[in-house]
Image (cartoon, helix red, strand yellow):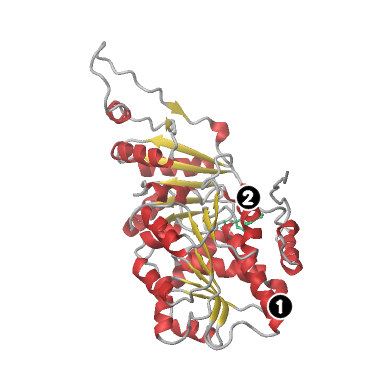
């Protein structure tokens, strides 16, 4: 009988010493579940479909084997893979921020290859000229958003004929952002024979269709999108018009090291920042109308701890790796249930304890129920002491909770008990 064991250290995964040395320096003590399960198969050349969110360690899952394969090929042929305007490893991502972040991670993992692997990131919102210059002589690994990549291809800055490995990162997001046509155009330019890895937090029909059309006999791995053991999710009912007051109260009261607050519209970011400023809280905003330079600065400031409170639209929800974020707050509920998972995934990263709070007023009750149902979660409705919801809101909540409540009996509806926040569960500085 053969016993199959999951490797518990990086050496067992078959990674080579320059990568192992780097992982030690980065203090990665052991592979995350997705790394342990996927890396050996990917090194063996298999296609991969992974149900994984940011925070699972998915970047290293595709980056490490890709780097290793390219480095070994290069050592064998004693020359760079990237001759002419060609690229060997192509990683497609939905957002500029993710492109930069993934490329930075790859460069960091490749430190001990001493410049042998050239990694370039290309994305919209900045001048294409610098990116064209960076692509001169090709690239071993190219991380790109689909639109800018197509532009660069049409300017002959890069060619996809020699791609050996393709990674589709956050495939669901890429399709939901409307990149379907760009993606089809790009896929048509790739050589037939290639290894493909597809990562997606969710698998709506569009992603399934793409998967079936693209991958051949893939290894399939599913890891939990948000780790329940490290992420506490809470839902607070608030009166209509009181969200800002409750938010300011929570921030003052709990002095989180940092907080990421989600709203649904660009203007709402500025609006909320102004209202918080009046309550003595300085917040920065992050949304799609900000120039790339401003976005990078805000993000760096938030990552380095210089900014405590960041108000963002969903553009920040995907793929941003902000280490050890103690709390994510849904000031506005996300429109789609999958966005809820992406947003809350910003907290409680890589084994850290995190907290995700949703503020729900009367208008949100029904939508939040749908979010819960689709994500197969169920949270207790709590209240913030000093901001108790009024009778009308409790009635409304009860009506949404039990829309089919039978009219018989005493006529009195049994109300769900509302609990207050137990102080000891809050995460403090
Ligand atoms: P990702 O899911 O790729 O965005 O990774 C999330 C975070 O986990 C990043 O900060 C990585 O540097 C970190 N990370 C990835 N793999 C490991 C590991 N095996 N041990 C510790 N941290 C890791």
Q: Is residue 32 left or right of residue 362?
A: right
- Residue at 59% across / 51% down in the picture? 324
- Residue at 52% across / 30% down in the picture? 422
The quadrant of the image that shows the N terminus is top right
Which quadrant of the structure image shows residue 382? top left
Where residue 387 appears, as percent x and y from the top left, is 39, 33
Where residue 425 appears, as percent x and y from the top left, is 56, 34
Judged from this view, the residue extending furthest toward the top is 410
Q: Is residue 157 left or right of residue 59?
A: left
| Residue 311 appears in the picture as rendered | yes
- Residue at 32% across / 35% down in the picture? 239
Q: How many labels, in total?
A: 2
Q: For mark 1, what is the residue?
A: 114
Name the N-terminal-most of marks 1 and 2. 2
**Compared with residue 106, is residue 420 higher up or lower down, i.e. above or below?**
above
Q: For mark 2, what is the residue?
A: 33
**Compared with residue 267, is residue 124 higher up or lower down, i.e. above or below?**
below
| Label 2 crowd (10 A; few <14 / some 14-19 / many >=20) | some
Which quadrant of the structure image shows residue 384? top left
The quadrant of the image that shows the C terminus is top right
Where residue 213 appears, as percent x and y from the top left, is 42, 63
Relative depth, front residue between 250 and 355: 355
Q: Quadrant of ligand 1?
A: bottom right
| Residue 361 appears in the picture as rendered | no
- Residue at 44% across / 65% down in the picture? 94
Where residue 234 appears, as percent x and y from the top left, is 46, 37
Relative depth, front residue between 95 and 422: 95
Answer yes or no: disc 2 within 8 Å of ligand 1: no
């Amino acid at each position: 009988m053969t016993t199959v064991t999951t490797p518990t250290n990086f050496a067992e995964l078959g990674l080579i010493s320059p990568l192992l040395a780097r992982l030690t320096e980065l203090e990665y003590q052991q592979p995350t579940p997705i790394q342990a399960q996927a890396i050996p198969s990917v090194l063996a050349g298999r296609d991969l479909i992974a149900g994984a969110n940011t925070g699972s360690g998915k970047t290293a899952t595709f980056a490490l084997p890709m780097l290793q394969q390219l480095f070994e090929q290069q050592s064998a042929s004693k020359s760079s893979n990237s001759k002419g305007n060609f690229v060997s490893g192509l990683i497609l991502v939905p957002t500029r921020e993710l492109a930069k972040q993934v490329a930075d991670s790859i460069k960091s993992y490749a430190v001990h290859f001493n410049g042998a692997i050239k990694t370039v990131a290309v994305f919209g919102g900045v001048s294409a000229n610098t990116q064209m210059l960076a692509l001169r002589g090709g690239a071993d690994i190219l991380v790109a958003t689909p639109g800018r990549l197509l532009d660069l291809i049409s300017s002959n800055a890069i060619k996809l004929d020699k791609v050996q490995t393709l990674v589709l990162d956050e495939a669901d997001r890429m399709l939901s952002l409307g990149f379907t046509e760009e993606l089809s155009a790009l896929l048509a330019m790739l050589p037939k024979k290639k290894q493909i890895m597809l990562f997606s937090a969710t698998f709506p029909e569009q992603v399934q269709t793409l998967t079936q059309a693209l991958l051949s006999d893939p290894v399939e791995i599913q890891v939990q999108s948000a780790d329940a053991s490290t992420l506490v999710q809470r839902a607070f009912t608030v009166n209509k018009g009181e969200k800002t007051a409750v938010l300011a109260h929570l921030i003052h009261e709990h002095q989180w090291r940092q907080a990421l607050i989600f709203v649904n519209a660009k203007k709402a970011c500025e609006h909320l920042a102004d209202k918080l400023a009046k309550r003595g809280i300085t917040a920065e905003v992050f949304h799609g109308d900000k120039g790339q330079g401003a976005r990078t600065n805000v993000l760096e400031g938030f990552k380095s701890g210089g900014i405590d409170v960041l108000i963002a639209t969903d553009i920040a929800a995907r793929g941003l790796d902000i280490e050890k974020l103690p709390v994510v707050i849904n000031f506005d509920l996300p429109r789609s249930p999958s966005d809820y998972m992406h947003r809350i995934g910003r907290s409680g990263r890589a084994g850290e304890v995190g907290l995700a709070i949703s503020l729900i007023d009367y208008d949100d009750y029904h939508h939040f129920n749908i979010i819960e149902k689709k994500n197969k979660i169920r949270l207790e409705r709590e209240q913030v002491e000093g901001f108790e919801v009024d009778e009308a809101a409790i009635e409304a909540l009860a009506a949404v909770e039990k829309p089919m409540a039978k009219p018989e009996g005493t006529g009195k509806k049994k109300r769900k008990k509302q609990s207050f926040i137990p102080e000891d569960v809050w995460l403090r500085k």
